[in-house]
Image: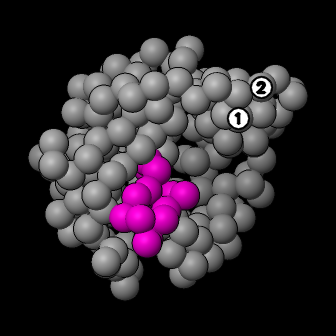
């Protein structure tokens, strides 16, 4: 049985923390999502408006948490109110009965290639297995997103295969996705 937390916890690894997203993250989320790489490789809309960030933090994320469909964390460097926002990471597309979930994330441009994303993936993965009780965590990655592929491999995920024609992009293009996964016995 999957245990769902009553509220989003705070997880730490050195100076990296995963914490609940908060009102003060709205502007950093909006700013980060102006980077075309984020909308290219994720479901973040483009153009991304300030109202998108407000709706995400104020309505979408709390509702998804209440419905037990997404557990969202803000990735931060440092601890407390003065921490530096670095991105978002979540478990979503969760199947509680099958003990599986999908991992999704994006890292702000200025926080990339510093080990922050890999630390965040390791933290949430450990929490998913040891505390929540997941048995399998998957991540779908655009084959052209070499940085994300590398990050997942460095965090102990394995490339299991290619999911052909898995997603339709906003421009109508049908895309394959690489399927990465980690199981709790690894």
Residue 92 in sight from this viewpoint: yes
* Quadrant where the C terminus is found in the figure: top left
Q: Residue at x 26, y 68 (%)?
A: 133
Question: Mark 2 Cα within 10 Å, few/some/many (few <14, many 20+)?
Answer: few
Instruction: Report the quarter where the N terminus lies.
Output: bottom left
Is the Cβ of the residue at disc 2 closer than 8 Å to that at disc 1?
yes
**Chain-order first, disc 2 or disc 1:** 1
CA neighbours of label 1 inside 10 A, class few (<14), some (14 to 19), many (20+): some
Q: CA distance from mark 2 to mark 1?
A: 6 Å
Q: Is residue 76 left or right of residue 40?
A: left
Q: Residue furthest bottom?
A: 6
Question: What span is colored magenta in the figure?
Answer: 88-103
Q: Position of residue 64 (x, y in %)?
A: 58, 71
Residue 15 lies in the magenta stretch: no
Q: Which mark is residue 4?
A: none
Residue 113, by quadrant, is: top left
* Left or right of 162 on screen, residue 10: left
Q: Is residue 17 left or right of residue 47?
A: left
- The residue under label 2 is 174
| Mark 1: secondary structure | strand
To which quarter of the image does residue 26 belong?
bottom right
> Badge 1 is on which residue?
167
83 over 55 or under it: above or below: above
- Image coordinates of residue 15 in percent, x first then y, are 18, 46
Name the residue at 36% across, 39% down: 181
Residue 19 percent location from the top left of the image: 34, 62
For the stretch drawn in magenta, the main secondary structure is strand
Of 155 and 159, nearer the camera is 159
Which residue is most to the left?
14
SS category of the residue bearing label 2: strand
């Amino acid at each position: 049985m999957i245990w769902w937390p009553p509220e989003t916890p705070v997880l730490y690894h050195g100076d990296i923390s995963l914490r609940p997203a908060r009102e003060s993250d709205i502007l950093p989320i909006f700013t980060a999502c102006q980077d075309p790489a984020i909308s290219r490789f994720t479901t973040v809309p483009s153009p991304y408006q300030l109202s998108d960030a407000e709706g995400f933090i104020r309505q979408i994320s709390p509702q998804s948490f209440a419905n037990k469909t997404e557990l969202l964390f803000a990735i931060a460097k440092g601890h407390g109110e003065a921490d530096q926002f670095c991105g978002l990471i979540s478990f979503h597309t969760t199947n509680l009965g099958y003990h599986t979930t999908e991992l999704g994330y994006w890292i702000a441009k200025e926080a990339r290639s510093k080990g922050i994303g890999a630390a965040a993936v390791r933290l949430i993965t450990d929490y998913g297995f040891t505390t929540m009780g997941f048995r399998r965590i998957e991540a779908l990655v655009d084959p052209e997103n070499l940085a994300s592929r590398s990050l997942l491999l460095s965090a102990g995920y394995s490339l299991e295969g290619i999911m052909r024609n898995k997603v339709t992009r906003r421009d109508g293009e049908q895309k394959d996705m690489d399927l990465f996964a980690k199981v709790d016995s690894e």
